[in-house]
Amino acid sequence: MTWFTGHVDEVFGLARTHLVLSMVPLLFGLLIALPLGWMARRVPRLYGPLIAGSGLLYTIPSLALFILMPLVLGTQILDPINVIVAMTIYTIALMVRTVADGLAAVPDHVTQAATSMGIGRWRRFFTVELPLAVPVIAAGLRVAAVSNVSIVSVAAIIGVAQLGSLFTDGFNRAFVDPIVVGVIACLVLAVAVDAAILLVVRLLTPWQRGGAAA
């Protein structure tokens, strides 16, 4: 704790950067995964290739992906955009199946009722199917969010500053205090992000609160 109290500003600065590098890709990945998951659900012949192809992305080692990004994007090795793009890829890998499964969980009689009321495909998707799929999608999003918080720390090895920098600093100096602070900070950040997602889901699904109360 003595080390932490002397480096509060540094830790909070690294935590803010860590949060951005974790959550911006989460948003981008979700936005990309939504149409891909929808296509996997609507076009049976695309389900296998999309689910398998996106899943394979998650098998790419994070360190290798961080190193490859500058070569692919033409950016500098320390450019945070490399981490954002890499983490977006990981988010897509986790979320495409989740989106497809969430849409598949919407009862057929609900979509048929919406169609019989004259609601078009796109309006039905945004006003009926997607809202009802939120709980399933959110469950996957929570996993992706916590995973992002964890994986981003690896980027410290290539010099991108965030909470993972506390690990490399501690290892390089054989000094355990920054390592412990870094671990705790990552845990707190992951819990906070998970709680924020749960709060958003609660706001987006008021009918679930009503069902629980009943």
Image (spheres, helix red, strand yellow):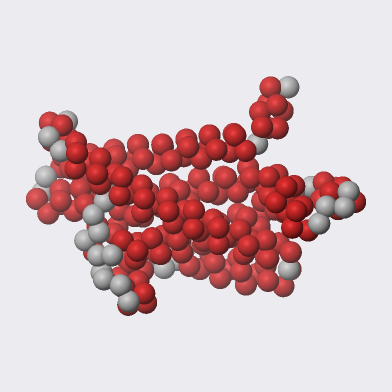
Q: Residue at x 61, y 69 (%)?
A: 50
- Furthest-left residue in this view: 173
Q: Residue at x 47, y 35 (%)?
A: 195
Does any portion of residue 105 appear in the rendered image?
no
Q: Position of residue 209 (x, y in %)?
A: 66, 28
Does any portion of residue 72 appear in the rendered image?
yes
> In terms of depth relative to the viewer, which is nearer, 125 or 198?
125
The number of discs equals 0
Q: Position of residue 181 (x, y in %)?
A: 22, 39
Q: Position of residue 19 (x, y in %)?
A: 36, 47
Q: What is the quadrant of the N terminus in the image?
A: top left
In the shown orientation, is residue 53 left or right of residue 130? left
Q: Residue at x 66, y 32 (%)?
A: 206
Q: Please, is residue 138 above or below residue 21 in the view?
A: above
In the shown orientation, is residue 26 left or right of residue 107? left
- Furthest-right residue in this view: 116
Q: Please, is residue 52 above or below residue 129 in the view?
A: below
Instruction: Place residue 157 in its image quadrant.
Output: bottom left
Instruction: Place residue 134 in its image quadrant.
Output: top right
Q: Please, is residue 139 above or below residue 122 in the view?
A: above
In the shown orientation, is residue 20 left or right of residue 94? left
- Furthest-top residue in this view: 214
Q: Residue at x 73, y 68 (%)?
A: 43
Q: What is the quadrant of the C terminus in the image?
A: top right
